Image (cartoon, helix red, strand yellow):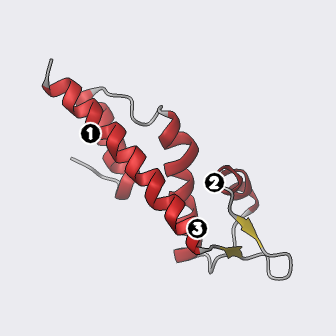
Amino acid sequence: MMKQQGINASVKYLDSLLNIDIEKSNIYKNNIDCWRVLRNILAHNYSVPDEKHYGQLGKINIHTTIETERVVTSMNDCIRLITDFESFYTMVFDKLLTIENE
């Protein structure tokens, strides 16, 4: 049973159930978790990141404006998000297929 929500909960659940180490993969650590942080900043912090988030935002090349210190995103950022999630899901499905074929 998942007590958490969202992608973190799904990743932890699959890791614990199937022992496939999604959480330790580069695509998850370097991209997907950073997009999750960006989503939370946009949804819950009025686009204003905390100091602790700048490193993760930098990993996905997201920056703030000098004037307002708010996160600014573009259509290219949205395309990168979709591309990163496609890569992530491809990796997850490949791992699941490997388990199924064992």
- How far separated are the C-alphas under marks 2 and 3? 12 Å
Tell me the residue at 32%/33% (across/down).
15
Query: Percent from the top left, x then y, of residue 102?
Result: 15, 17
Q: Residue at point 72% right, 51% down?
A: 55
Please name the amino acid that badge 1 sits on: Phe
Q: Is residue 93 above or below residue 34?
A: above
Q: In this view, does 62 lie to the left or right of 84?
A: right
Q: Position of residue 68 (x, y in %)?
A: 80, 82
Q: In this view, does 47 lie above or below 56?
A: below
Which of the pair 23/90 is nearer the observer? Answer: 90
Q: Is residue 55 above or below residue 96?
A: below
Q: Under tag 3, what secondary structure?
A: helix
Q: Which of marks 2 and 3 is nearer the N terminus?
A: 2
Q: Circle 3 is placed at which residue position?
A: 76
CA distance separating discs 2 and 1: 23 Å
Residue highlighted by disc 1: 93
Callout 2: few (<14), some (14-19), or many (20+) C-alpha neighbours within 10 Å? some
Residue type for callout 2:
Ile
Question: In this figure, which residue is indicated by the disc labeled 2?
Answer: 60
**Residue 82 versus residue 64 in the image, above or below:** above
